[in-house]
Image: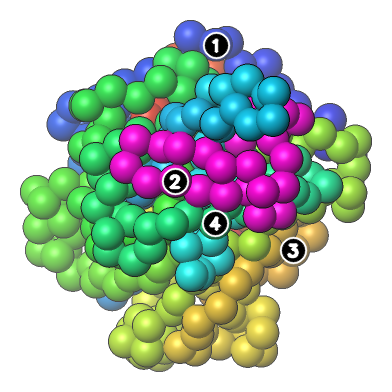
Amino acid sequence: MRVDLFDFDLPDELIAQRPIQPRDAARLLDVAPDGLHDRTVRDLPSLLRQGDLLVFNDTKVIPARLRGVRGGTAGRQDVAVEALLIRDLGAGRWLSFARPTKRLRLGDRIGFTDFGATVETKNDDGSLVLAFDTTGPRFLAALEHSGAVPLPPYIRSGVADAQDRADYQTMFARFDGSVAAPTAGLHFTPELMASLADAGIATASVTLHVGAGTFQPVRVDDTDAHTMHAEWGEVPAITAQAIAETRARGGRVVSIGTTALRLLETVARDHDGAVAAWIGETDIFITPGFRFRAVDLLLTNFHLPRSTLFMLVSAFAGLERMKAAYAHAVRERYRFYSYGDCCLLRR
């Protein structure tokens, strides 16, 4: 499909720079069969049914933005380097983006605050593989000390502060590995979770380590030419069982965010519509025409024009319906993207 079909006007001032406090006070646009309804996240229990199942992404954002220096050798000057870790390749090797890429060569050593790395590979898409000399828990501990929260560039130009350490992490975060937050989960609080439980609404979790592909704009004219980065995910057996039981009693599966949806639909695509226990990588790219099998409702933030995420929600709820919903959101001054408001969509 033409990428310009997913374009719309979004004033810069509607891209939220800080989250609303408390988190569940954010606005929620209910995109219902009978029209658009302005609500808040605290209304969510009344918008769902007893027996529904919410599925959260329990990944944890790591401080994946690093600053270091490439040491000068053989007449070459020292160069300041900024690196963004994308994906753990194992054995201390990380797929990364780095600036200035053109001044880095294979074998170059980069010194960061608490460890060093060697440029092992340079890829055609501008990414590279950094081999770090510290691995495992020691590496993650060092990241916590010297790394920065990897905010996208449209939030304060990507410059994070101490407050973002808490703001850019969901209450469900358990497993280190993401370089972008599963932002729909940012709206939940212990109080809201208690209200959902009182309403007879169950919860389950999956893990999808969100990669920097979330930050990357679509630079092609046709969606067929866009390449998604692979992301690692896991559906635990207990979650697969909860989904099967929800289906059996006539309940609905509600994905909290596009990351959980992408993982569930990957597994359902490979298992004839069923969601089974699963571990692996997914590079699924969902655009209109996709056949959804796993998810009935989607709670998700408002996304940017021409983004893969706006394409996904358009596939889920219909392009024209989403254009109308987003036009309403802009007109009513909803707050967009990671720290912004959200909408509830039905398949």
SS at mark 2?
strand
Q: Which residue is mark 2?
A: 116
Q: Earlier in the sequence, mark 2 or mark 1?
A: 1
SS at mark 1?
helix
- The residue lying toward the viewer, choosing from 331 and 269, is 269
Colouring scheme, one of rainbow, by chain, secondary structure, one colour: rainbow
**Label drawn at residue 131:** 4
Q: Earlier in the sequence, mark 4 or mark 1?
A: 1
- The residue lying toward the viewer, choosing from 2 and 63, is 63
- Front of the two marks 4 and 1: 4
Q: Which residue is mark 1?
A: 12
Residue 330 is covered by the magenta coloring: no
Residue shown at the point (41%, 37%) measured from the top left: 112
Does the CB distance between marks 2 and 4 fall below 8 Å?
A: no
- The residue lying toward the viewer, choosing from 150 and 70, is 70
Residue 347 place in picture, x, y as percent:
58, 59
Question: Marks 3 and 4, how far apart in space?
Answer: 38 Å
Residue 34 place in picture, x, y as percent:
51, 43
Read off the magenta span.
98-121
Q: Earlier in the sequence, mark 2 or mark 3?
A: 2
**Label drawn at residue 290:** 3
